[in-house]
Image (cartoon, rainbow, N blue to C red):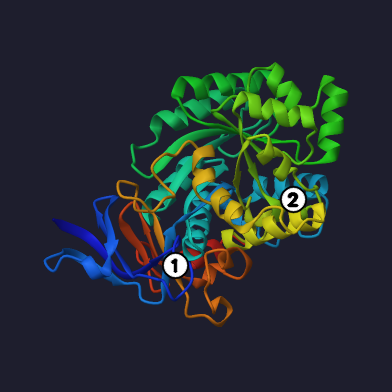
Amino acid sequence: MHNDILIINARLSKDTGTRNFLPKYLTISGRLISKIGNMADIPKNLQADKVIDATNCLVLPGLVNGHCHAAMTLFRGLADDLPLTIWLNEHIFPAEAKHVSKEMVYWCSKLAAAEMILSGTTTVADAYFFEEEAAKAFMEIGIRAVAAQGIIDFPAPGVPDASKNIQAAGAYINALPTNDLVTPALFCHSPYTCSPKTIQAAKELANEKHCKLFIHVAETKAEVENHQKTHGLSPVRHLHKLNILDNNTVCVHCVWLDAEEIDILANTGCGVITCPESNMKLASGVAPVPDMLKRRVAVGLGTDGCASNNDLDMFGEMSSLAKLHKVVNLDPTTMPAQQCLQMAGLAGAKVLGLNGIASLDVGMQADIILIDLQQVHLTPFYNADILVYAAQGSDVKSSIIGGQLVMENREILTIDVDETIAAVNRFM
């Protein structure tokens, strides 16, 4: 059988220790993993267009960034060390009004995609305005994406008439080219920037188009208190009353929840994406992730945008996730490394409604990264737990997404990264 890519001398992420390690080979045909076996048993006549020698590398599924605003790379470092409301209303919203255009979203999303690929992310859930331009950038570079068009109740980039926000979102989904890597979705910014009528209309559109609806929920204490005063209910309870919460809705952040609200999320099947570094940087609080997991809420991990993180490195995000909850709970067993890896992989993929990714098994999508273990900070290698506590995005050597080699030996093969950097700098 002919293969497009053959990876040899690989150590799979499930392999532990060094003494009992058996080198593996892995074949990719089209977009799928077609075979996995021991090097000792590799057929002599096995052929492939491309052979990758993974000696001294760890092969694992690509990471899933469950929440990002890719175009906001332009605002990285623009307004640091500020409370969320001041940061958002006095700096980010004005900067967006001044800078956001189709061209800006295209180039800045391409830059973000390059940063993610270079740090091991192969799938991203993105949410912004002019999202068709972000989708175009994602298709060109070859990253897998759930690309959600932003909806908000005041004039926004590309939608100057807020009364047409749902119409514009529908037009976005209808116009998005069919692509194996990019899936359309909708993004209501939050319950405090979208009216109940808008949120319900967005949910109806999402149901009609069979796509996910993302929404920021309960990110800050002030948000929850103000929502309670305005609507007489907390954000989660209010969304539940509006029949918004189900397994096709993804609530982002969910920092300020009580036990009853966690049960609502669990019972409705609603997914959650936690963004610990963004929440820490903006001093929003600490999401009750361990409690959500105990109640079987589906939780994935995301970076949020560069304006509030300030990078898109999921290895750093996993490390922050693990350590933050250990210190808050005064329990070193909280959020073990394997659980963090799952949230940045298979669990995150399930929250996004993506089947067939984030697993090294025959028949799964070939979204694969190679980690260079020949690093002083990764030596010795006992098991994959070290990835959470010591690995860095720069340790990713090569990346394959949907069967396409998009990065090899730290070089992105699908776009000109220098051209992209230069283009983004012109918007400053």
Element at badge 1? helix
Q: At 73% across and 27% down in the image, what residue appears? A: 236
Residue 108, given in percent of the width and then of the height, sits at 53, 56
Compared with 372, 425 (above or below) is above
Mark before the other along the chain sequence, 1 or 2: 2
Can you see residue 420? Answer: yes
Q: State the residue lying farthest toward the left.
A: 45
Of residues 105 and 192, which is closer to you in this image? 192
Q: At 28% across and 61% down in the image, what residue appears? A: 37
Q: At 55% across and 76% down in the image, what residue appears? A: 378
Q: Which residue corresponds to mark 1?
A: 417
* Amino acid tagged 1: Val
Within 10 Å of disc 1 (Cα), the crowding (few <14, some 14-19, many 20+) is some
Can you see residue 281? Answer: no
Q: Which residue corresponds to mark 2?
A: 279
Residue 66, given in percent of the width and then of the height, sits at 56, 46
Distance from Cα at disc 1 to Cα at disc 2: 30 Å
Residue 370, given in percent of the width and then of the height, sits at 41, 67
Q: Are marks 1 and 2 in contact (CB under 8 Å)?
A: no
Within 10 Å of disc 2 (Cα), the crowding (few <14, some 14-19, many 20+) is many
Element at badge 2? helix
Compared with 395, 324 (above or below) is above
Q: At 67% across and 18% down in the image, what residue appears? A: 197
Q: Nearer the viewer, mark 1 or mark 2?
A: 2
Q: Quadrant of residue 351?
A: top right
Q: Quadrant of residue 45?
A: bottom left
Of residues 255 and 126, which is closer to you in this image? 255
Residue 414, given in percent of the width and then of the height, sits at 35, 62
Count the labels in the image.
2
* Amino acid tagged 2: Asn
